[in-house]
Amino acid sequence: MVKPTLLVLAAGMGSRYGSLKQMDGVGPNNEAIIDYSIYDAIRAGFGKVVFVIRHAFEKEFREVFSAERFGGKIAVEFVFQELDYLPEGCSVPEGRVKPWGTNHALLMAKEVIHEPFAVINADDFYGAEAYETIGAYLKELATVKDRYCMVAYNLNLTLSENGTVSRGVCGVDANGNLTSMVERTKIERMPHGGIVFHDLGEDEPLAEDTPVSMNLFGFTPDYFDHTENYFKQWFAENEDHLKGEFYIPTMVNKLIADGTSELRVLRSDAQWHGVTYKEDKPALVAALKEYIAAGKYPEKLWE
């Protein structure tokens, strides 16, 4: 059986957090969130991890996240996202400094991934159950095209106590397939206890169990071709928008809307953890201590 690959989007520096948060220690022996993600992926049967990074911190990153760190239990490769890494016929517009977004970062791995793969953010803790769920689904897709998946979380398990968050709110049909993904910004829990988003000019309520995307997607390699082809169209339409970004949901929504692909929504009751804000870190550190005490992770992850 073909083992799926884990694609880790680690090119972002995390400006809101104030440091290279992909490298920041959160475990008792200075393990990073990435360490726990890869540990969970190995247990779920993934065979390779591919990091999307930038040349600016390549040396530092490679020194930490080498194959030796993981005890040879998973193959490791690196690819790079840079502003001028564009398909033929595209060039960086004058004044453009912002990266091209998550789906452009994903495209950077086209030449090294030839099997079903999961995509994650480097700075999100998804939980072991999520990797088991998506890993099992991906193992069934080795000879399939245009059937993708994602792990959706209950909204109430993805909030921050330190500010508003943005989430992709998912529409799901009776067969469990995605019908739409709408980015909602400025989501927070209000003093009265309810969850609302503010991006339409007034408070709009959201249910506690609203399924939301945390950028944990599963694809087959044909997705790279769809991405490369559509990026050229997106680029032509957005060339003058110097802050526009080509996100994974942009591509997914397009493929679903035109009937090219279907995407199964896999639900997870796992508690998501992240560091959207620097103040979020203590809660994650405390949660990891609880997981270790409960036997979900060893205290020394890579011994």
Image: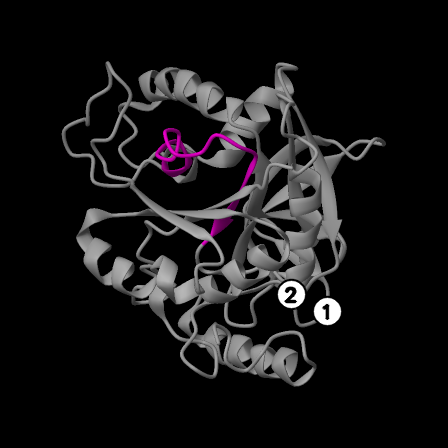
- Image position, residue 172 (x, y; %): 76, 35
Residue 268 magenta: no
Amino acid type, label 2? Arg
Query: Residue reaching furthest right?
Result: 174
Distance Cα–Cα, label 2 vs label 1: 6 Å
In magenta, the rendered stretch is 105-121
Image quadrant in which you'd find residue 18 = bottom left
Horizontal side, residue 265 vs residue 148: left or right: right
Seen from the viewer's position, the closer of residues 213 and 109 is: 109
Give the residue pinned by disc 2: 189
Depth check, front residue: 179 or 151: 151
Would you identify the image quadrant in which residue 42 lies? Answer: bottom right
Q: Secondary structure at mark 2?
A: strand
Q: Are marks 2 and 1 in contact (CB under 8 Å)?
A: yes
Q: Amino acid at mark 1?
A: Gly
Estimate the x, y position of residue 220 in percent, counting from the top left.
Answer: 56, 29
Q: Quadrant of residue 97?
A: top left
Q: Which residue is the site of mark 1?
A: 193
- Label 1 CA crowd tier, 10 Å (few <14, some 14–19, many 20+): few
Neighbours of disc 2 within 10 Å: few (<14), some (14-19), many (20+) = some
Looking at the image, what colour scheme do you see?
one colour
Residue located at (45% from left, 19% from top): 225
Magenta-colored stretch includes residue 111: yes
SS at mark 1 in the image: loop
State left or right for residue 273 relative to residue 71: right
